[in-house]
Amino acid sequence: MTGLLLAGSVAVAAVAQEPTASGARARANALVARMTIDEKIELVHGLFPPMATGKTREELIPSAGHVDGIPRLGIPTTRQSDASLGVANQVEQRKGDTATALPSSLATAASFDPAVARAGGAMIGAEARAKRFNILLAGGVNLTRDPWGGRNFEYLGEDPLLAGTLGGAHIAGVQSNAIVSTVKHWALNPQETGRSILDARIGEAGLRMSDLLAFEIAIEQGRPGAVMCAYNKVGGDWACENRFLLTDVLKRDWGYPGWVMSDWGAVHSTVKAANAGLDQESGQELDRAIYFGAPLKVAVEAGQVPMARLDDMVARYLTGLIATGAFDKAMPAKPLPIPYAAHARVAQDAIEAGMVLLRNEGALLPLSPSVKRIAVIGGRADIGVLSGGGSSQVRSVGGVALEIPLPADHPAASFTRITYHKSVPLAAIRALAPQARVTFDDGRDPARAAAVAKAADVAIVFATQWTTEAADADDLSLPGRQDALVEAVAAAQPKTVAMLETGGPVLMPWVQKVPAIVEAWYPGQRGGEAIANILFGQVNPSGRLPITFPASADQAPRPTPPGRERMAKSAAAAAANPGAPQANALTGWTVDYPEGADVGYRWYEKKGQRPLYPFGHGLSYTQFAYRNPVLTGGTRLSLTVDVVNTGKRAGADVPQMYVARDGGGHPMRLAAFERVTLKPGETRRVTLIANPRIVADYDTTLPGWRIAGGRYRVALARDATDRTIVRTAELRPTTMKP
């Protein structure tokens, strides 16, 4: 874990040098006082370089965004790049420019380790600065409310404590390089189908206790310089002109000092958006009009937007730059060398910590070094590993193994392709089993693949599911004939391993027929090597699911994306009448979230559903025991326990603490967790302290958080369904401000 420790130590040193928010704001106010109105307007709207036609004072690097600085005041130009998984270059806007590709954010979340998240953030932040960017559009913490979400792989799972904690660590890592990280997409943006026209509806208490709580924790722990608002409406208002979200919650209740930037193409007005709390229009060419340029100046001069509001918009932008160090640390005049080998180690550490061993009947894994014949089947395992699509797409170091253009009518066709990183599982397996005969079959013909598997001692079948921003998964089944492929291989070879490269949960109708199943997510640019290390026991799997895998699609709150049929009808009508206006094309629809705060595993418990694999689940090649648990109450819930490695291998465990008020009728909530690495026979005393906002309910009549006095049940668990060790304790009533 040297790469993690190195990146983490650099991050800690840099964060300690940040100015205070109040000091940053004072400097910002002094700068604003010296500006003309035209200079102020210039800072609150930015270009989208691939489409920009206006002149700039600074070089326009092909990327996500650009805002000119003000040289006479020392205000720097800002250059913005996507995203959380590496410095993106989606369709090779910058010819030949590659970057280190982390595994999917779900893989990072599966580590249950803030150090992993921080190291990944520090690494991509360092590369962003070396490539002359000072704003990274990272920090995705939207909860994965639906298993079919196309962008689930970019997020950190379904639990607000896990997503917020790891999101905050990732943001802090990015910003340790004196650049800004965003946190996004604010808020309630869990689906891609109709994302720019739908209206998400949820009660305030439920929203505060779920999605907003994830943001609140991430902002507290990561202190991002900027918040990016979402495409969708929330409660009837566009997220980027939603006063409740932008001003009441974020700036008033939480005292957030930085600025709110729009998502690209998410601005719909000038006066309403500015007065609601939007501080900057990003990528203005993707909006229907430039709302925060000349129209904002007119609105200010007419008194429709107060000058004080414009001053606040600019001051918040400058505060975010100053507080993170991006204002004072000049960008390099030309790209700097990058230690790609060390950074690749960070990416590999992340996926090795986040890969999840779902099933291991008969201890099939790890594979014996003496195995003589291995069949590797499917998933293009002979050329590379799959990557998720969209604005987070990274062109990885070492080159692209395969790039498949999308159909012209696909909603993501203009900015992404189906891409495989050039990290080859087949080659990595052969390297770790040099004495074995390793045979590959592409899996296109299940019968032929079954014959190859039967002739081997063990079969490893790779199954893939590609997902992307701008489109949700068609369903939870493996696409193509892959379920039939896995069935055929397992029927022919009793020693079959299923290796899944997916954007999130998939159904497994063959689950009882396959003795070993590993979730590898989108494993990043060193995924092939990491997969081989897990298979042969060079690395002990330790990931835990950050998202529930349902047993069937109808277990989830929404079996399919709301609005999908309507979108399909609109597309069909447009195809039948090219060029004709479609009356219903942009009218949108409402998506209700009746589960409220009971997201993910809480929903399954509430409904009495038994998922295929629960949140928090993950196996190991060793065994762990929990001994001598002691629970105390009073003003907080504290659970202390001995975690013991009772097996013969070193490994990592993740004891999880779930809480519910006794008799309250609510599902249990993850209130604390800790990743613990132990040698064989080693014992460590661990104390888990429940986050008070997880124990509390949000009371809109206070307003604020209320912990009801009384008895609470606490489960020390291996996953969200484990009730083997349950204790109770009394808590005194407490209230907290929002």
Image: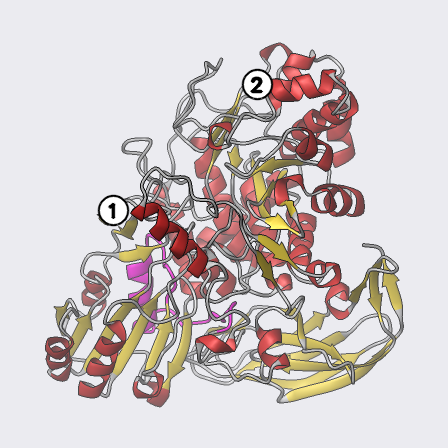
Front residue (pair 738, 428): 738
Q: In this view, does 413 lie to the left or right of 452?
A: right
Q: Label 1 belongs to which residue?
A: 405
Whether residue 431 is visible: yes
Q: Which residue is rendered at x = 34% and y = 37% of the image?
A: 579
Whether residue 369 is visible: no
Q: What residue type is labelled 1?
A: Pro
Q: Which residue is rendered at x = 48% and y = 71% of the image?
A: 559
Whole-percent x, y for residue 199 in the image: 60, 52
Residue 69 numbered tag: 2
Above or below, 605 against 520 in this view is below
Q: What residue type is labelled 2?
A: Gly
Q: Is residue 545 magenta?
A: yes
Q: In this view, does 16 lie to the left or right of 491?
A: right
Label 1, secondary structure: give it.
loop
* Span of residues in magenta: 520-548
Front residue (pair 265, 511): 265
Above or below, 81 against 539 in this view is above
Q: Which residue is rendered at x = 54% and y = 32% of the image?
A: 282
Above or below, 733 against 392 in this view is below
> How busy is the neighbourhood of tag 2: few (under 14 within 10 Å), some, or many (20 plus)?
some
